[in-house]
Every structure is written in structure tokens, then in C-alpha cells.
Amino acid sequence: MDPKTNFPRPIPEFDAQEYWEGCNRGELLMQRCSSCKKFRWLPQPMCPACHSIEGEWVKVSGKGTVYSYTIITHPVHPAARSRVPYNVAQVQLDEDPQLILITNLVGIQNEDIRIGMPVRVVFEEHSPGVMLPKFERAA
Amino acid sequence: METLKDKTAIVGVGHTEYSRDSGRSEMSLAVEAIRNAVADAGLKPTDIDGIAKFSMDNNDHVFLAANLGIQKLRFFAEAPWGGGGGPVGSIMLGAMAVATGMADCVVAFRAMNERSGRGTGRFGLAAVREGAPGARGYLEPYGFFSPAQAVALSARRHMHLYGTKSEHFGAIAVACRTHAQTNPNAVMRGRPLTIEEHQSSRMIADPLRLHDCCLETDGGAAVVIVSAERARDLKHKPAYIMAGAFGATDHNTQAVVKFLERKHSETSVVADDLFPRAGIGHKDIDICFIYDHFTPLVLMAFEEFGFCKRGEGGPFVSDGKLLWPNGSLPFNTSGGNLSEGYIHGMENTIEAVRQLRGDAINQVKDAEIAFVASGNAVPTTAMILHR
């Protein structure tokens, strides 16, 4: 991968290996406390609600809504130069309002993006062996 | 409970030229700013026995001390989180050290070549690398890198929730630029800005326009903190530190992104402590300095610090109250990060001290109490000064 023509790939953290492995299988997994069953994001070893260190990764529906978005026109990375204007969005997952992911919306014109728009997850290849969760408009 | 109230004071302020390319080292900027601040206080560099720096500042405590001829450095500390913890945070570390006898004379400073990139690298450019580690791995693969892009998300959400408009953000940019026009050290002196020019400036990350984003600047700025008792014998009228506070919250794990509907923000955590510690209310503030990295975050800071209700920041900043000399709450009277120079808020701190001494260029008549806040949307700090 040429770091000048592609955005950096994720380096999976120790506490988030399952997340990225799920993405590579086409499944969106979220971390949930095994004890109190509360979801959490970002990945972290302890449940901030009940302080259990027993966590589990569960497949979620992949459905959510657009919480906010921006259209980036000023490239701050060389790989952005050929991509501007491009969108970055926050998607709030249906399972828990605390689950808000940073992502790109695909298959939609930037000017058609709206806050509150229903979306669903799709997986796109970032580089060989790395799949990223992105979101498309849900019918 | 014992507090820091009025136990310490800022007695000296100093800075270098603010420019787009200093042409010299960051150490050179730091020692010149510190030397000027110490001289302003009527002290010598060797009177310094404590140094509090921004964690992100490349200048090391002991190299600074060696350069300044300090044989006995009794206190060294650093304040994390860039422009959030940094400016007021480093000053508060100094104040706490002086109040507890760890040191007698602490300097807090920021010096960097952020615009030219000599030593620091330009802040607004993303690192080119194959892999993004840790929490950056959830952001950079999507082309999401810079603080401006993160602030754009929060700004868009604020507009959605409350009907805030780009013109409201513009009012903040225009206030800072207007104040810079009389400041000989301001990078943007001679380049006034109208709201129409703000509205036609190019988009950086929608809804953030060019003029919603602060400058990048080469320069250094420093302040000197001593006990209130010692301050009374020095050259200038002291700027007493009434109160200070630090604050962070759980969503600060997410890189400059705010979650506006949550009860606590880093800024509200600070506000909850700051005003009770000072023993005053918002109406007692004569002049305010709010870290102006991005205009929407200034608007949100006014809300979260309690100057107005949440959601009312747009009208609050747009009615002229921020403008010197006629506004009721003059704001960033030397031009701030947006128009004087982006010395990560230390330039605002210097201006606050000058206002309380009564020798500022855009002097607010009878300014007695100044509110000084570091950057919103990252773990942050604020203080209240009085003359």
C-alpha cells in the first residue's frame, strides 16, 4: 500500500481484534458487557457502567441513522487530493444511542446527505485484507 | 475547603514576534519569550525556579533551564491535551506549585514553529503513514484526520439541533479580526474581515469555512507566576488568580468530537467548579478570552460555560456584545488565535493580563475581572483573574 495514495489502514488494538476480524467477515460486531449487557464504544477492556472486565463481541443489525456529517473539501493528506470532496459521517447505531461510529457514506451524493437519514452497513475493501464498515442509505 | 483564591498572581508577560516563518529554532523562541516575560515582571531569568510547559511543546525543561542560566530548578511540570490543558493548565500548575511552596517563581510558556514546520511539523497536515494506531484506526482510514474536520461534525449537529447558522460562527471571526486591526503584533493586522467575506470564504470541511479556522503561527509566549504577597512588590499591578479548574469527560476519547446532547462536556465540568471557586457569577465578568481554535467551539463554549443557555450561542455571539469598545462582554481583544497569532491561547492570556493592568491596546474601561478559557472539545482548563 502506498501511504501517499491511500489513507492509513487500521492497526487493530489488542482490545479490538475481534472488531476488525468481524469486518473482514462482513459482520459488524460491537462490544458488550457480559455482565450488565451494556454496549460500549470505543473498544475498551472494562465496562464503564458495572466495571466487569468480561466483555463479548456481538453482531449488531448494522442499521442506524446519520447523527452528523461533513463534506471535506480541503485535503490535509496527499491521498485526499484525488478524493475531495468526500464525506465523513457519524452514524448512530439502532442498538444503543451511545454507539456512534465515524464512517463514510457510500452510494449517495454528498448533497443528498441529511441528519437522521436511515442507513445500513456495507463493507468496502480499504486495501488487501482490510475491510472497512461504511454505510449506505437504507430504503 | 482551602482554595487557591488570590494566593498567586501573574506578574510578567512576554512574547516574540508572531509570524508565518520565524526562521529560527523553537528553543530560541521559548527563551526570548521567557526572558521578555521575566523582564516585564522586573525579575531576572535566574529568579525562575519552576517551569510549566505544554506536554506537546518540543522544548525540554532542563534544556530551557540550562539556557536561562537556572542552577536550581525546583519544579517542572507539563500540561497535556494541547490547547485544552495547555495554556491555562500550565499556568494553574505554576499557581499550585507557588501556593504550596514547591517553587517561588514559575514560568509557563508555549513556543513553536507551527506554521513553518521547523521542528514541529504543520499542525493542519495529516501524518502520512501506512497504519493508524489505537483509536486513530477508527478515524484515519475514512480520511478523517484534522481537528477542523472533527469540529465540522459538531458544528453541523449544533446547526441541526438549534438552528445555528454559519453567520453566527462568522460573528466570532469578525470580532477577532476587528480587534486585531489595532494590534501591531497581530498577524492579521491590515486585513479586516466582513461577515460577507466570511460567508464567501472557501469551505474547508462543510460547514467550516476558512475564516472559521484559526491561524497557524510561529512564535513564543510566556507568563510569570509568583505568590500574591511577592507580586505586590513587583513592577506592575498583579493579575491575581481567583480560581482555576480542569475538566474532561468520557467522550474526550473521540478526538475533538463533541456529543452535544450529553449532560457533561469537558467545558461544563470546568464551569461547575470554576465559578463557585471564584465566588462570582457570569455577570461579574468584564472581559472574556475564549480559546478560538474554531468559531463553532467558541460559540459552544459560551453555552457550556453558562454565559447563555445551550442552543442560544448563535444569537448570543451575534448581537455585538463581543466587540470592543461598545460590547457588553468584549472578547479576545487582541485578535486571539484567529487573528493575532495561534500561540495556543497563551497570547489570549497575555492580553487578559494587559487588560487588567490597564495598558492593553483595545483597553476595556475599568476591566476588573477577566475570564480566560483554554480550548473547548478536548480536556480543558479555565481561570478567572482580577486586578
Image (cartoon, rainbow, N blue to C red):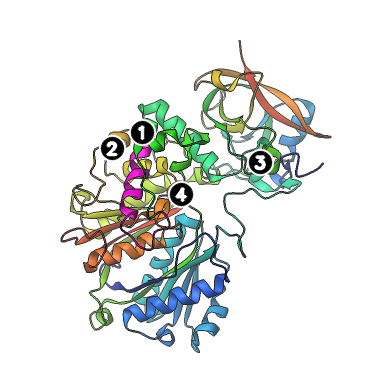
Amino acid marked by disc 3:
Glu
**Mark 4 highlights which residue?**
B214
Position of B132 with respect to B95 (left or right) is right
Note whether residue B252 is visible: yes
Q: Secondary structure at mark 4?
A: loop
How dense is the environment of label 2, judged by Cα within 10 Å: few (below 14), some, or many (20 and up)? some
Q: If you read the primary sequence from the N terminus, does the residue marked by circle 1 or circle 4 appear first? A: 1
Q: Secondary structure at mark 2?
A: helix
Amino acid marked by disc 1:
Glu
**Mark 1 highlights which residue?**
B167
Q: Secondary structure at mark 3?
A: helix
Task: Compute the Cα span from label 2 to label 1.
Answer: 8 Å
B375 in magenta: no
Along the viewing direction, whichever of B281 and B287 lies nearer the viewer: B287
Task: Compute the Cα span from label 4 to label 3.
Answer: 22 Å
Q: Are marks 2 and 1 on the same chain?
A: yes
Residue with the most extreme bottom position: B71
Q: Chain of mark 3?
A: B
Q: If you read the primary sequence from the N terminus, does the residue marked by circle 2 or circle 1 appear first? A: 1
**Mark 2 highlights which residue?**
B318
Q: State whether the magenta stretch is mostly helix, strand or loop.
A: helix
Viewer-nearest of discs 1 and 3: 1
Task: Compute the Cα span from label 4 to label 2.
Answer: 19 Å
Q: Are marks 2 and 3 on the same chain?
A: yes
- The residue positioned 22% from the left and 54% from the top of the image is B285
Task: Compute the Cα span from label 1 to label 4.
Answer: 17 Å
